[in-house]
Image (spheres, helix red, strand yellow):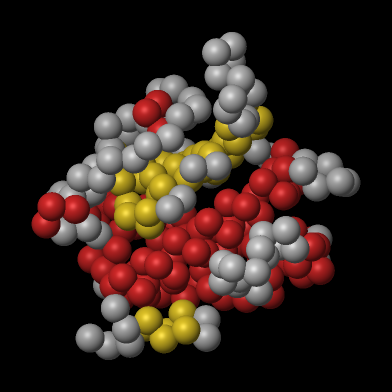
Amino acid sequence: MLARILGKHSLISDRGLIDRAILLLSQEIWCWGRDILRPEGNWLQEIGFHRIEPPEGHDECSSVYSLDLPGDRVVVLRGFGVFYGDIRLGGVFLHRYEFLPQYTKLAKLDAQPWLHADLPDMNPPTERQRASCAALMLDLIDWIRSYEVNIAELLGVGYRRSTLVKWDNGERPIIRAEDMPREWCLLGIAMAADFRSVLPDGDKDRIQYHD
């Protein structure tokens, strides 16, 4: 198998690619949380995200953040993952700790995803759905890359470094702030070259998540 290069790491297996992608997504979700708590103001709201506070009975849940994009597209951020929908293609959900695309024909969520159980029925794409799922994944990755580029340009790399201070617990690998846009770009390139590398197979086709 050809080696895939992601940042300074040579990924020579699908598992290696997925592990690196999980690390990147988990760190990104941490950063979104820090951007919400930014002392100068909630950055997600400043760039147009809608904050939906949890209803009665969901006091243990954090707010949902949703951003409408041109072309009837939407990004929904949760602490346990991210949903991306496009009216032309459907929707995809990435669980924070399992970088395995879960696909739905629905481009918008009927209910707010307070818990993973609130998401619609989502499964690995069938062969006929694979092209749509791949397009959604690549669009989502490019949106995240653009988000980090804007952070660097508008708030500065120093700001992003500051959000990673508490993320660095001395045990988990850390992706440098200045490398994050490039890492997302290279992940997209690797997936565009072989989307099947991040799809489950065999008895892994259905994955059960717990909130």
Using residue 210 as the reference point, say whether residue 201 is left or right of it. Answer: left
In the orientation shown, which residue stands out farthest toward the right? 40
Is residue 114 at least partly visible in the picture? Answer: yes
Quarter location, residue 100: bottom left
Residue at the spot x=72%, y=43% of the render? 36
Q: Is residue 21 left or right of residue 47?
A: left
| In the image, residue 164 above or below residue 136 | below
The answer to whether 160 is drawn above or below residue 11 in the figure is above
How many numbered marks does the figure carry? 0
Q: Position of residue 158 (x, y in %)?
A: 81, 68
Q: Is residue 10 above or below residue 52?
A: below
Closer to us: 125 or 68 = 125
The C terminus - image quarter: top left
**Taking 202 as reference, is 164 left or right?**
right
Residue 201 in picture, x, y percent from top left: 16, 59
- Residue occupying the point 36% across, 45% down: 92
Q: Position of residue 40 (x, y in %)?
A: 88, 46
Front residue of 71 and 182: 182
- Drawn side of residue 132 relative to residue 50, left or right: left
Residue 19, quarter of picture: bottom left
Which quarter of the figure is the N terminus placed in? Answer: bottom left
Please tell me which residue is depicted at 25% across the width and 60% down the height of the picture.
Answer: 199
Q: Which residue lies at the image location 67% right of the left edge and 60% below the top edge?
A: 167
Is residue 192 shown to the viewer in this render? no
Residue 30 vertical placement versus 161 (above, below): above
